[in-house]
Image: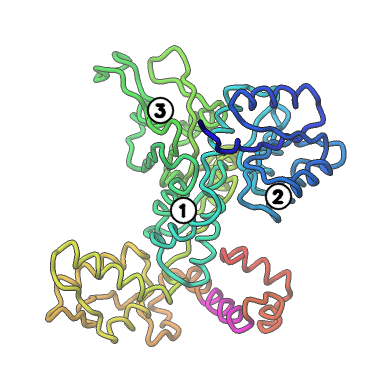
Amino acid sequence: MNTSPRQKILIVDDEPDIRELLEITLGRMKLETFSARNLSEAQALLQREHFDLCLTDMRLPDGTGLELVQHIQQRDPHLPVAMITAYGSLETAINALKAGAFDFLTKPVELPRLRELVSSALRLPTAGGLSTAIERRLLGDSPPMANLRKQIDKLARSQAPVYISGESGSGKELVARLIHEQGPRASQPFVPVNCGAIPSELMESEFFGHRKGSFTGAVEDKPGLFQAAHGGTLFLDEVADLPLSMQVKLLRAIQEKAVRSVGGQQETVVDVRILCATHKDLEAEVSAERFRQDLYYRLNVIELRVPSLRERRDDIEALAMHVLKRLAKDTGQPEARLHPQALEALKNYRFPGNVRELENVLERAHTLCENRTIEAQDLRLSEGNCTADGAMADLTQIDNLEDYLESVERKLILQALEETRWNRTAAAQRLSLSFRSMRYRLKKLGLD
């Protein structure tokens, strides 16, 4: 006999019919339900009971569902909250996701979608253990990496679309995989696709599939990437490379949560979480009319910036040691060591190719070095991207002034924060900045 306690769901809605519908549906799923008619009743129940999920209407007699999301985020951030909104209130739903909601439903509530959402939310890992799993895969103890791990931990518990920005080689796909693996879809497929690597004439077939005979060469039915990712996550890498014609079709698929294969007559419902990334400035692409603004807003519900290796030089030693251990294991040779001068050279290198370039540099040096010791000359670093003892580079060596100035600004701000134990007000005063200016710069540099 199963004596385990039933999972508890809090339902918050002032409409008796909606509450009754949700109670009956969830009761049939063997879940215990508690109901509240308004914000104050919900907050009182949250103080007395532990819940596994909260379903709340957006409009409440004494407040909003958004206030409830914020209340729960402060007191129990691991409790998933799903927002119920009126049909077509997309902006409201997006604001809820940004505030920390797990997902949203639209009225009238579709019961299959409700059951799917509830099952997904209840599969979320319990509090604890997430950060440890992320730390094993995402190395580095610098403040930017600590902040990144914290954001991944939070975003893994949401179903919100995430736009992962960052330079080439900084680890955007790894971040996407961690968001997937730490969330409720972990047991389902993670399907990565490089949007810039698909020929434009094959894009629709690749994304949505095709039926046999729909075009020359279509000798059998073939599912597309959306169908392959059903129940899991579709990661659109280099999404800025999508042609405008495909952007329209992608937007519709995301909005309708359904796709029609090439040559097909009926649409197929798909349940996928969309993560995307690009090394380009997507907002600039929108301004240049190379990327649709409406698609940008659907993909960029939450932006997660992956720091460049230049911004976390303190992590270079740990990353290098990890790479050398892996190379020794892969080659069956004793582990090579870095000469102190070689390590110093790595720390003073700009790494335009980021972590990927660091791995390539060490792999080459691992092969070239003698006596299992990597000397500075074994690294063969490009002189144009080196600085002397961490000092300011010669102007002839700077290939991107904006990037260089940003790295200097970041270094000074991080130094001020560390010296003031991350007291932002004190750090702003030390740098002769207003608090508002400091807050803007922290957000711009991904340090907020």
1 vs 2, front mark:
2
Q: Secondary structure at mark 2?
A: helix
Q: Residue at x 59, y 33 (%)?
A: 118
Is residue 411 highlighted in magenta?
yes
Q: CA distance from mark 3 to mark 2?
A: 34 Å
3 vs 2, front mark:
2
Q: Return the x and y of residue 54 as percentages of the image width and height.
A: 68, 39
Q: Return the x and y of residue 45 as percentages of the image width and height.
A: 77, 43
Res 280 label: 1
Instruction: Answer left or right for 268 relative to 65.
Output: left
Q: Residue at x 61, y 27 (%)?
A: 114
Mark 2 Cα within 10 Å, few/some/many (few <14, many 20+)?
many
Res 295 label: none
Amino acid under label 3? Gln
Residue at far front of view: 1
Q: CA distance from mark 1 to mark 2?
A: 35 Å
Q: Return the x and y of residue 68 as percentages of the image width and height.
A: 75, 45
Vertical position of residue 140 compared to residue 99: above or below: below
Principal secondary structure, stretch drawn in magenta = helix
Mark before the other along the chain sequence, 1 or 2 = 2
Q: Identify the magenta region.
A: 408-420
The residue beneath circle 3 is 227
1 vs 3, front mark:
3
Q: CA distance from mark 1 to mark 3?
A: 28 Å
Q: Secondary structure at mark 1?
A: loop
Q: Secondary structure at mark 3?
A: helix
The residue beneath circle 2 is 72
Amino acid under label 2? Ile
Q: Return the x and y of residue 211 as percentages of the image width and height.
A: 34, 16
Mark 3 Cα within 10 Å, few/some/many (few <14, many 20+)?
many
Vertical position of residue 309 compared to residue 234: above or below: below
Q: Which of the 4 image quarters holds residue 423?
A: bottom right
